[in-house]
Image: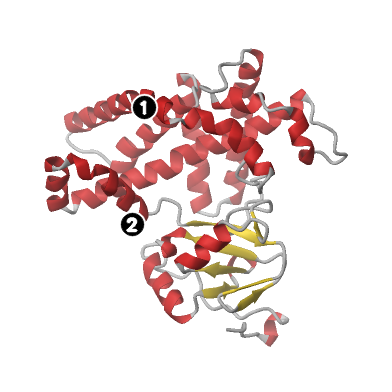
Amino acid sequence: MEPRLDSSDHGQPASEFDPTAPGVDADPHSMYRDLRERCPVAHSSAHGGFWAVTTRKDVERVASEPETFSSAQGIIVPRNRASGRRPPLHFDPPEHSVFRAAINPAFRKDRLARLEPIVAEGAARLVTKAVAAGEADAFVDLASPLAATSVGHLLNLPDELRDTFTHHASAFEHAQFRFDAETVEAENLVLYDLSRRFVAERAADPADPDEDVTSGLLAIDPAKLTFLTVDGSAPTRDALVEITAGSIRQLVVAGHGAPALVLANAIRHLALDGELQDRARRQPEIMPDLVEELLRLHTPNQGFARTVVRPTTIGGRQLPVGAMVAIPYTAAN
């Protein structure tokens, strides 16, 4: 399908859907269902203009073809002016792989298994508190504090810093939902300052890089990061600290927001399905599949985005270099 042009829009594709329309936030599935049937690769004039792919096949292609669809110019619609480039999220292979190799050891199964009882204890404590109070908000009183505690332990954050991170990460996330650019920028700067403080402490007293994400990032050979400088020379030690601070700031926000959302949605889903609750209690062996299905059904991040870096055709539409392409996982799922 060739793009329908609107002459009043100086030759730009006409808008084929509006993600800001009333009701979309409450029920995005109806919009995506309509687009999959009517126009699976669609253009919107919202947020400065972008495309969206809505079938599983196209979402998988855009997400896994960085040589055509790049993360380097931003990964959300609309582009976040406060974002900056934080590794590994805003880099493509092979640069992306350098950071992932440093981060991955801390996510080993044996290390996560050691954290499991800590997370379980935190969940039990929050539930006990909620029961004693007689009522609780699934997100505010359970999912959000549990996610914050869990990511804090995952990153070895000290308790006092974890609480401060959580407060400002929540403020940042809520401002993004409201498209409040001024608050997003202010909270982003606070989060960076907190991250720099923590990373500087780790740089002065590093931990085992296989057990500590921050120490793993700081242990990267600067010679592997020449792509981060204009003249091609290796970054200085101070530059590596700044790069690492960006990664930690990203992990704190992502490690709090998405898990909290999916957990709150799971609680709601089970609250509305007593039969499934009973089955999960009778058959605990179904829990791995149940978790996977809840993640699919209640996708915590509706999607991300990429930028076209070479002319391409997808779903019969020709996309030019520079076009922003949304990849809504909710639609693919």
**Of the pair 213 and 153, the residue shown nearer to us:** 213
In the rendered image, the quadrant that contains the N terminus is bottom right
Residue 297 bears which disc, if any? Answer: 2
Q: Which residue is mark 1?
A: 113
Q: Residue at x 81, y 38 (%)?
A: 229
What SS does tag 1 mark?
A: helix
What colour scheme does the image use? secondary structure
C-beta proximity under 8 Å, tags 1 and 2: no
Query: In the rendered image, is residue 87 in sight?
Result: no
* Amino acid type of the residue tagged 1 in the rendering: Ala
* Amino acid type of the residue tagged 2 in the rendering: Leu
What SS does tag 2 mark?
A: helix
Q: Percent from the top left, x then y, of residue 287?
A: 24, 43
Q: Percent from the top left, x then y, of residue 64?
A: 57, 56
Horizontally, is 137 left or right of 193 in the view? left
| Mark 1 nearby-residue class (10 Å; few <14, some 14–19, many ≥20) | few
In the rendered image, the quadrant that contains the C terminus is bottom left
**Of the pair 253 and 53, the residue shown nearer to us:** 53
Q: Residue at x 48, y 66 (%)?
A: 57
Q: Residue at x 59, y 27 (%)?
A: 194
